[in-house]
């Protein structure tokens, strides 16, 4: 259920000065038991975020105000001790596992807990990005993932988000992405990290409108949402966003928000101010304008840009990570999982006689007319002729469409348009004749497709890019006819399928997801540049054809990146087709377009990015620059820099070139000594073992069909388990991707892959053979899986109020495991430590508190027994040991608390020092409105920094363990 602020009930506030509960505490509110997950200070008390434990409120998430409700804290020294009578001490091990899972990892812990346990290859360069984002020296987890196309930024996003969730900093997450990659992003996060997001595309919004009242804020109802930026920036949602805060916001393809005056940028700034963690991702991280990039940096850290707008490059290097295929961090890791791209193959195609005639008409009448003036009668007369030239280079069909579209706009009765109308009519006639007579470039395409093996009965696939929709449709019809391929009809995809921006978001997603399947009927995907940004097309394809060459390096690079990316096992083969008429000027000048392709390849190899070669960082601006070259007004070498010129030219280009080549060293905190990357809690070796015990304990006969069981079945040879979700679990699964629920009938049978090898195989099989869905049939049981969360909540509810278990273990003396957590004003866990307190003489409790490096180390020291003889009687007499253990561990934690305060104080002082220096510089300037807004942001950062200081400590016993031959009642009598 969703979190709501509970504001009803008798006003009987808990005084703010005496309220000491922290995450992990058990509290009683309205006579129900709740687990505290977060505590936030308010003007009149605290907001206490909780999850229900007792039967009536189980699975319910709520927020209580101590100014309204009486929130009663449990006294950890007064817990009662009860013997675990379950087989193999199962209930106590499940409870301990659940409590450790529910305790957030400390925000300053340099070790990773979940990023390396998702369904990915865990490449070190990706983990480096995670550690950089989580660097405790940052005030908040904020980063710009600027890795080049194909390095797996989506995986890095998933890794960062999973770590934030485990640290208690990812409860509410918003992901903003282009609409055509909504499902792709949703799928990667769910299938690899078990992070479900509600997708608000056109279908999702329609479904939500049926569930929620019109005045209900959807962002308070759903905790984790993925939505397109075009949808989110509508007025309907902006009002809701202003009233909401997030734990984490992801803005994918963030180059779309770099223009400070745009609606996208205003939305991004709003979100940046409303979230704790912020992840920006773009292979083209800036537009060449320092002021625009500075605005992006301000979203991440406002103090990294001086009041006068200069970038602090040392701080920027801590906020931005940039690598490419040949970066030192990457080259040695990707290996055969990313085959090296072959050099581009440029095919120049001599124009046919009719195409030559069209080119002469364009050259002599429109591009370089003898009179000095083209027939164009509108404004910007120098531009439209090049629109026609570009259409000509795309296809005769595109030229005919451009001519007719212009012709329709002209007034037949206006004498001023007569010359243009006559010229257009001549050009239209030539274009139609050239189209009907057959295109030389189309013939070259057919030869190329035959050469690489594309056919009606073959399996070879190819992606063909073209800019004009008229070209796409003409190519699809011609190829289907000549190669005898089927075409798409409605929802039934054919062997030739067209993808362009005029399709709905769901239609685009269906085509892209189908193309990833081995069973997909698509052999030729004819696509516009809607597929050039963020779409993965490499799983079944390594051939790409530029049917027309973009006049933009950015666009060329984006297109190539669809098949040239991590996970591509075959060397990508990229082919360009260029029609070359024999005309003197036009035919000669357009050959520079093949040089663009070559320059892109050089930049791809050296820098991983080609945008810096022209330096405008904008597709339209690049097209205009190349038009100037084609028109003869500029030289190509003066417009397109070399790789060497970029590296030595200074400014942002040089900065990113140095980052991309490893010239700038980016140090990140590494787990050292006692803080290695962790796997699990130490109680259960795997999530599957925990889930199996939980089902056996809760359901009793889980293998039986409902209602007596859940049809629990384990296929050990395949490492797959399956069950029919009980009602309370099925309710939680409603937020899973709807297409996944539908395709795999999850509510009927939920299949789980419980090893990484099986999980990877399920992903592969989902795209292979006869599979009709890209969703895996068995879902990987990752650490953050909702079914594990369900099992943990059920386990915590098994103990009564203020109780802990007593069990046996292979130890010398009765021992109590004690957990100590330190939290800051924001309710975040700053540090968590674990002590085992041993009592050599239980009759005179004076325990020896021994600290442990981690929870798994502490659990290992207990040597918990797996055999329960049922002879542990008189456990209630162990209560004094639990109370003494709390006092001993709390005393021992005092020294740690001092060290934590000092370490945090140093960070806070550094943050505040930077803020005050920024303000001093700002005070010397004219106080314009924008400067005042930025100063207010800096003041907010100062307040935020102060809130990072440790505020409270929670010490609580978790379990009592006694030796195998120890009898509590006898010991008490003695």
Image (spheres, rainbow, N blue to C red):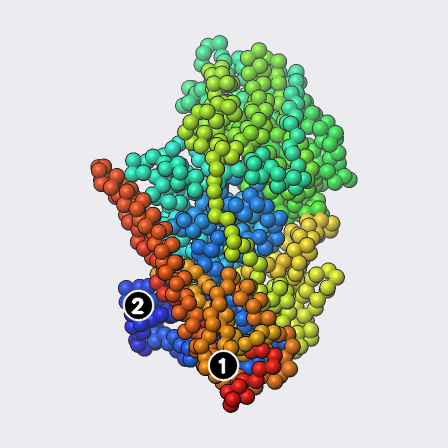
Disc 1 crowd rating (10 Å Cα; few below 14, some 14-19, many 20+) is: some
Q: First in sequence: mark 1 or mark 2?
A: 2
Image location of residue 168, percent across then percent down: 46, 60
Mark 2 lies on a secondary structure that is: strand
Image location of residue 434, percent across then percent down: 64, 22
Q: Residue furthest bottom?
A: 973
Residue occupying the point 61% across, 44% down:
512
User: 953 or 802: which is nearer to us?
Assistant: 953
Residue receiving disc 2? 45
Image location of residue 107, percent across then percent down: 44, 56
User: 313 or 298: which is nearer to us?
Assistant: 313
Give the numbered dot on residue 652. Answer: none
Q: Is residue 904 left or right of residue 410?
A: left
Image location of residue 675, percent across then percent down: 51, 55
Disc 2 crowd rating (10 Å Cα; few below 14, some 14-19, many 20+) is: some
Q: Quadrant of residue 970?
A: bottom right
Q: How many marks?
A: 2
Residue occupying the point 66% across, 18% down:
350
Q: Residue furthest right?
A: 457
Q: Is residue 526 left or right of residue 281?
A: right
Residue occupying the point 58% across, 78% down:
963
User: 911 or 612: which is nearer to us?
Assistant: 911
Above-or-below relation of 747 to 451? below
Residue occupying the point 55% across, 45% down:
126
Residue receiving disc 1? 842
Q: Is residue 449 left or right of residue 910?
A: right
Between the C-alphas of marks 1 and 2, the distance is 41 Å
Tell me the mark number nearer the camera, choosing from 1 and 2. 1
Residue 968 appears anywhere in the view: yes
């Amino acid at each position: 259920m969703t979190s709501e602020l509970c504001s009803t009930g008798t006003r009987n506030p808990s005084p703010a000065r005496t309220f000491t509960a922290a995450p992990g505490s058990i509290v009683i509110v309205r006579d129900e038991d709740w687990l505290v997950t977060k505590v936030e200070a308010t003007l009149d008390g605290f907001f206490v975020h909780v999850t229900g434990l007792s039967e009536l409120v189980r699975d319910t998430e709520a927020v209580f105000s101590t100014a309204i409700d009486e929130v009663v804290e449990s006294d950890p020294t007064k817990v009662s001790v009860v013997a675990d009578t379950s087989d193999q001490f199962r209930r106590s091990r499940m409870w301990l596992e659940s409590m450790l899972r529910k305790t957030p990892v400390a925000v300053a812990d340099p070790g990773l807990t979940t990023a390396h346990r998702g369904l990915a290859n865990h490449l070190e360069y990706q983990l480096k990005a995670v550690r950089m984002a989580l660097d405790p020296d940052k005030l908040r987890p904020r980063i710009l993932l600027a890795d080049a196309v194909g390095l797996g930024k989506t995986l890095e996003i998933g890794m960062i988000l999973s770590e934030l969730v485990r640290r208690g900093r990812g409860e509410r997450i918003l992901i903003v992405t282009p609409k055509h990659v909504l499902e792709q992003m949703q799928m990667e996060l769910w299938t690899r990290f078990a992070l479900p997001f509600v997708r608000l595309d056109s279908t999702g919004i329609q479904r939500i409108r049926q569930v929620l009242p019109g005045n209900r804020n959807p962002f308070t109802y759903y905790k984790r949402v993925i939505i397109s930026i075009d949808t989110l920036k509508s007025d309907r949602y902006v009002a809701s966003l202003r009233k909401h805060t997030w734990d984490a916001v992801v803005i994918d393809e963030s180059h779309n928000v770099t223009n400070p005056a745009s609606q996208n940028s205003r939305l991004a700034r709003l979100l940046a101010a409303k979230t704790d963690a912020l992840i920006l991702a773009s292979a083209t991280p800036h537009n060449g304008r320092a002021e625009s990039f500075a605005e992006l940096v301000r979203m991440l850290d406002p103090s990294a840009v001086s009041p006068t707008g200069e970038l602090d490059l040392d701080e920027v290097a801590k906020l931005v990570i940039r690598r490419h295929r040949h970066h030192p961090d990457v080259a040695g890791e990707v290996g055969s999982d990313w085959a090296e791209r072959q050099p581009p193959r440029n095919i120049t195609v001599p124009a046919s006689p009719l195409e030559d005639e069209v080119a002469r008409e364009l050259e002599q009448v429109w591009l370089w007319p003898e009179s000095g003036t083209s027939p164009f009668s509108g404004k910007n007369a120098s531009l439209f002729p090049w629109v026609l030239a570009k259409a000509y280079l795309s296809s005769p069909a595109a030229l005919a469409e451009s001519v007719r579209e212009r012709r329709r706009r002209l007034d037949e009765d206006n004498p001023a348009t007569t010359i243009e109308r006559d010229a257009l009519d001549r050009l239209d006639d030539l274009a139609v004749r050239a189209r009907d007579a057959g295109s030389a470039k189309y013939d070259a395409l057919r030869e190329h497709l035959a050469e690489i093996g594309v056919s009606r009965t073959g399996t070879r696939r190819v992606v063909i890019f073209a800019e004009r929709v008229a070209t796409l449709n003409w190519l699809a019809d011609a190829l289907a006819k000549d190669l005898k391929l089927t075409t798409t009809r409605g929802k039934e995809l054919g062997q030739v399928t067209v993808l362009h921006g005029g399709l709905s978001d769901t239609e685009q997603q269906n085509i892209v997801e189908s193309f990833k399947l081995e069973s997909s009927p698509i052999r030729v995907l004819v696509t516009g540049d809607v597929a050039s940004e963020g779409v993965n097309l490499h799983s079944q394809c390594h051939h790409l054809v530029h049917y027309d060459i973009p006049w933009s390096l950015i666009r060329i690079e984006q297109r190539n990146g669809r098949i040239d990316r991590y996970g591509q096992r075959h060397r990508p083969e990229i082919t360009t087709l260029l029609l070359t008429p024999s005309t003197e000027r036009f035919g000669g000048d357009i050959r520079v377009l093949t040089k663009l392709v070559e320059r892109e390849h050089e930049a791809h190899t050296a820098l991983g990015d080609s945008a810096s070669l022209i330096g405008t960082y904008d597709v339209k601006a690049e097209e205009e620059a190349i038009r100037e070259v084609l028109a003869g007004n500029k030289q190509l070498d003066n417009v397109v820099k070399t790789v060497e010129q970029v590296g030595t030219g200074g400014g942002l280009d040089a900065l990113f070139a140095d980052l991309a080549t490893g010239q700038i060293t980016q140090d990140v905190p590494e787990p050292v000594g006692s803080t290695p990357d962790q796997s699990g809690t130490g109680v259960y070796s795997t999530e599957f073992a925990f889930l199996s015990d939980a089902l056996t304990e809760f359901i009793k006969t889980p293998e039986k069909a409902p209602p007596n069981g859940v049809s629990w079945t384990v296929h050990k040879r395949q490492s797959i388990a399956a069950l029919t979700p009980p009602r309370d679990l099925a309710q939680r699964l409603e937020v899973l991707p709807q297409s996944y629920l539908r395709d795999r009938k999850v509510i009927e049978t939920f299949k789980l892959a419980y090893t990484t090898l099986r999980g990877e195989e399920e992903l592969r099989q989902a795209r292979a053979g006869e599979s009709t869905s890209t969703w895996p049939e068995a879902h990987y049981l990752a650490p953050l899986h909702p079914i594990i969360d369900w099992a943990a909540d059920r386990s915590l509810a098994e103990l009564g109020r203020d109780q802990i278990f007593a069990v046996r273990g292979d130890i010398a003396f009765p021992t109590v495991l004690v957990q100590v957590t330190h939290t800051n004003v924001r309710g975040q866990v700053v540090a968590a430590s674990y002590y085992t307190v041993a009592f050599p003489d239980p009759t005179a409790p004076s325990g020896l508190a021994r600290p442990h490096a981690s929870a798994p180390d502490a659990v290992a020291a207990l040597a918990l027994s797996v055999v329960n003889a049922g002879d542990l009687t008189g456990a209630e007499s162990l209560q004094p040991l639990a109370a003494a253990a709390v006092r001993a561990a709390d005393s021992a934690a005092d020294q740690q608390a001092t060290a934590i305060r000092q370490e945090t104080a140093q960070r806070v002082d550094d943050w505040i020092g930077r803020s005050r220096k920024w303000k001093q510089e700002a005070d010397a300037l004219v106080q314009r409105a924008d400067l005042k807004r930025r100063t207010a942001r800096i003041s907010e950062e100062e307040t935020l920094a102060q809130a990072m200081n440790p505020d409270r400590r929670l010490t609580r016993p978790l379990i009592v363990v006694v030796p195998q031959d120890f009898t509590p009642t006898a010991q008490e009598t003695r």
